[in-house]
Amino acid sequence: MGYGPNLTDLFRQAANYVARILKGARPVDLPIQRPAVFRLVVNLKTAKTLGLTIPPSLLLRADQVIE
């Protein structure tokens, strides 16, 4: 399993920072932003190999299930 920020969203935030700096904003004046979107990915093949059982309720909440 993996739970972490959505990388696509992080790249968009970085591009927004670059655009604001290129338009003349000072980097010191830009706010610090934290990731707002997180993803849960479950790898069932690895879980099966390790002998783990993933509850169906967790699988329903997962953004991506790798079989």
Image (cartoon, grey):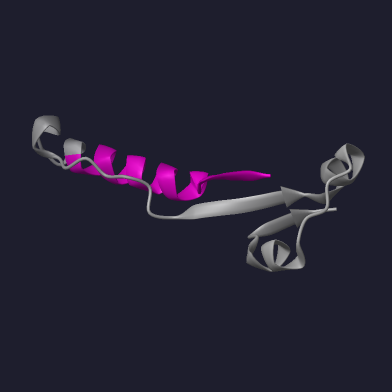
- 27 relative to 39, above or below: above
Q: Looking at the picture, tell me which residue is in the foreground, 36 or 56.
A: 56
Tell whether 28 sits left or right of 65: left
Query: What residue is drawn where x is 70% and y is 68%?
Result: 57
> Residue 27: x percent and y percent?
14, 32
Q: Name the spot of residue 36 as percent of width and height, x first.
A: 38, 54
- 27 vs 8, left or right, is left
Q: Residue at x 83, y 53 (%)?
A: 53
Q: Position of residue 66 (x, y in %)?
A: 79, 52
6, 52: nearer the viewer: 52
Q: How many marks?
A: 0
In the image, residue 53 lies in the stretch drawn in magenta: no
Kindly indicate the quadrant of the structure image that contains residue 17.
Answer: top left
Magenta part of the chain = 1-20
The residue at 27%/44% (across/down) is 33
Does 10 sit left or right of 2 as displayed? left
Viewer-closest of 22 and 54: 54
The quarter of the rendered structure image containing the N terminus is: top right
User: Main SS type for the magenta part?
Assistant: helix
Instruction: Please state the horizontal and vertical placement of residue 20, each as a whole percent of the image.
Output: 19, 43
Name the residue located 27 percent from the left edge and 37 percent from the top edge.
18
Residue 2 falls inside the magenta stretch:
yes
- Residue 60 vertical placement versus 32 (above, below): below
Q: Which quadrant of the figure has residue 64?
A: bottom right
Q: Is residue 60 left or right of residue 7?
A: right
